[in-house]
Amino acid sequence: MATIKDIAEIAKVSRTTVSRVINDTGYVSDDARERVLQAIKRTGYIPSEYAKSLRTKQTKVIGVILPKISTETVSRMVSGITEELSHYGYQVLLANTNLDPVLEIDYLKLLKARQVDGIILVATNVSDALIKEIHKLTIPFAVLGQEIPGVTSIHYDDYQAAYDITRHVIKKGHTSIGFIGVPEADQAVGYERKRAFIQAMRDHALPLNEHWIQEAKFDIDSGNEAIKRMFESRDKLAPTAVIAVTDRLAIGAMQYLKERGLSIPHDIGITGMGNSELSRYVTPPLTTIHYHYKTAGEEVARIILDKIDGKNNDEKKSALSYRLIERDSL
Amino acid sequence: MATIKDIAEIAKVSRTTVSRVINDTGYVSDDARERVLQAIKRTGYIPSEYAKSLRTKQTKVIGVILPKISTETVSRMVSGITEELSHYGYQVLLANTNLDPVLEIDYLKLLKARQVDGIILVATNVSDALIKEIHKLTIPFAVLGQEIPGVTSIHYDDYQAAYDITRHVIKKGHTSIGFIGVPEADQAVGYERKRAFIQAMRDHALPLNEHWIQEAKFDIDSGNEAIKRMFESRDKLAPTAVIAVTDRLAIGAMQYLKERGLSIPHDIGITGMGNSELSRYVTPPLTTIHYHYKTAGEEVARIILDKIDGKNNDEKKSALSYRLIERDSL
DNA sequence: CTGTTAGCGCATTCAT
DNA sequence: ATGAATGCGCTAACAG
C-alpha cells in the first residue's frame, strides 16, 4: 500500500504538497500538481481515511444501532438514512442488536470507540440503563421510532394514528371492536396504540370487553393465536371488527378468520397498521396506516448532519406523518 | 475525550503500562493495574479504534456493498453477515449503491481507503469494469449472489433451481407453460433461470411458444403486465401454467389472473422463486423455491474471516442449497 | 508557492 | 515489572 510519503518521493515534493493537491487546499504550482497526480495514478495510491481521521477528528461515519435489519420497517429506514448520508460523503456503520438490549449499550460504547461522527438509534424498547448511557454521550445523537425525554427524536405519532384508525372503524358503524396489541414494554407500538384504542372507545361511549383485548408478539402466528383466544372466550360473543397494531398481526388474524369460514369484511372487519408490502397483497387487501419510514430515515440523517455542523444542537422532537389507507378488509 | 496519555498521568504509570493492562499483554504489577483500572473507570476512557488501527493495520470492519438494502433478500443476507461477524468483534460498514453500477466502483475505492479488513459484494449485475476493479483488490473479498470468474463467491444455483421447478410443473401434467423472466443482464435471475426453463422444456420435448416467454422488471406491477401480454397475444392461446422467476412477478401475475376471473390453480397454475414472506400469505399461497439467504450471509462472513486469518486464500466457489416449497398455486 | 516541524492516540521494540 | 523512544499516515501551523 502506497502512502503519502511514497508519493512525495516519487513526485519529488514534500508530503505537504501532496496533501495539498489531494485536498485541493492552498497553492500548488501546476508543475508540482501534475507530478503528484501522475504519481498517484501510477501507484494507485488512496489516502488512508484512518490516518486522516486521527488528525481531523472526523470520521465521516455515522453509527446506526438497530434491533433487526431484516424487517421492512427497519430496512426502509436504513435505506433512507444511507441514501441521505451518502450525499454528504458519510457512511453507515451498522450495529445490529438482534433485539438484545444488552448489546445496545455495548454497541453504543463500541461506536464511541470508533469515533463515529454521530449515532442514530432505531429504537424499540428503551431501557433506563440505555437512556442513562445516551445522556452521557457527547457526540451527536438521535433516536428514530420512539420518544426519549431530553433526546432528539423522530417518532411516529402512534397514539394519534391508533386513535384515528379506531375512530375510522367506529364510523363504519362498528360498536363491538376487538384489539390485538403487543407488550406494553414497547412504548410506541405496545403502550401508545393500546392507550389510544381504549381512549377512542371511551370517547365514543363504546364498551370494552376484556376478552377482546388481546396481547400478542410481533409475528404472524401470534396474531392468529390472539384472535383465536378472542373467539374462544366463554361468553361466545365475538367482535364485528378487530384492530391489530401491526399488519402482520392482522394478517395472522385473517388466516384464523378464513379458516373459521368467516368472510372479511362481511362477517368481520379487520385493520392493521404499518402498510407493509404484505398488506397490499393479502386477500382482501388490508386497511391500514401508512408511515413514511424511508422519509423518516432521511430526516433523521439530516438532523444528525445538522448537529455535526453545529447548527440545531438542541433537543428536537418531531412526529412523522402518516395516512390511513382504506382497502377492502373493513 | 480522555486519551491513553491522560490515564497514564492519572495512574502515575507510563502509557506503555496502560496499553498493557488494556490489552492484557505482558507483565503488570497488581498495584499498577489497579490504579490504571481505576483511572479508566473514573474518566470513562475508551481507547480510540482509529489510532489502534493505524498501528495494527487492522480495522475489524468489513465493508458490505449492496444494491438496495430494503429488499427481503438483501436484508436477510445482511442479517446473516452482521450476526456472524459480530461473534468475532467485526462490524459492517454499509455501502448502498441503490442499483447504480458506477457507485459500486466508487464504494470499492472508498472501502479500500477506509482500510476495511475485507469486502463483501452482494451482487446483481456485474459489469466488466467492476470485475477488473475487483481483481486489482488486495484485501480479502467475496461475492454473494453471483458467480465471478476467479473470485470467491457463494451463488445460488439458479440454473438447477429453475430447472427443478420447471420439471416440477411438467410433472404436474402441464405441457403449455409460460415464463416470466427479467432482463438477461442479470446473470443469475435473468439469464440462468431462463436458460434452465428452456432447456427443461426441450428435454421434455415440450413446445416453446414465443408469446409465452415474457420479460419483466423486478416489481409486482411488471409481473402483471407481462402476463397480460401473454394472454393478449393474437393467437388467443394461453398456457395452463406460468413460471415466474421471482415471487413478486408471480404475485403480479396472480393479480391479473384473478381480475380476469381465472381460478388458481384450477384454471391456471403459477409458481414463483424466492420464498418471500409475501408468497406464504397471498391467496392461494405460492409454490416457490426457498433459498437460504441468511445462511448464505453467515457463510460468506465466515469465508471472509478465514481469508483474513490467512487460511483458505484461494478462490472458492459454493452454491447454496435451496428447496422447492409446494403450496397451493400449482 | 513550498517545505519543515509537530503531533493526533496508540502498540511495540528495546532497554533497564 | 516498567518506561523511553519510535513510527503508523496524515494535516496544519509556521516559515520561508
Image (cartoon, coloured by chain):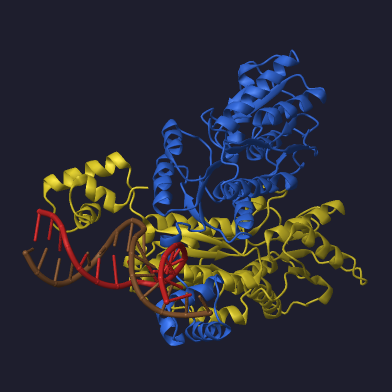
Chain colours: A blue, B yellow, C brown, D red
Q: Considering depth in this image, is B206 or B288 the residue closer to the camera?
A: B288
Q: Residue furthest right?
A: B234
Number of labels in the image equals 0
Taking the spot 87% from the left edge, 54% from the top edge, the residue there is B260
Q: Is residue B56 above or below residue A183?
A: below
Q: Is residue A281 visible?
A: yes
Q: Considering depth in this image, is A96 or B163 the residue closer to the camera?
A: A96
Q: Is residue A15 above or below residue A190?
A: below
Which quadrant is the C terminus of chain B positioned in?
Answer: bottom right
Quadrant of res A1: bottom left
Quadrant of res A4: bottom left
Taking the spot 44% from the left edge, 43% from the top edge, the residue there is A104
Q: Is residue B156 visible?
A: no
- Residue A233 coordinates in the image, percent (x, y): 61, 20
In this rendering, would B59 be left or right of C14? right
Q: Is residue B257 above or below residue A244?
A: below
Q: Considering depth in this image, is A176 or A138 the residue closer to the camera?
A: A138
- Residue A136 coordinates in the image, percent (x, y): 42, 38
Taking the spot 39% from the left edge, 45% from the top edge, the residue there is A106
Quadrant of res B75: bottom right
- Residue B226 coordinates in the image, percent (x, y): 81, 65
In this rendering, would D10 be left or right of A290? left
- Residue A59 coordinates in the image, percent (x, y): 48, 58
Taking the spot 40% from the left edge, 65% from the top edge, the residue there is B302
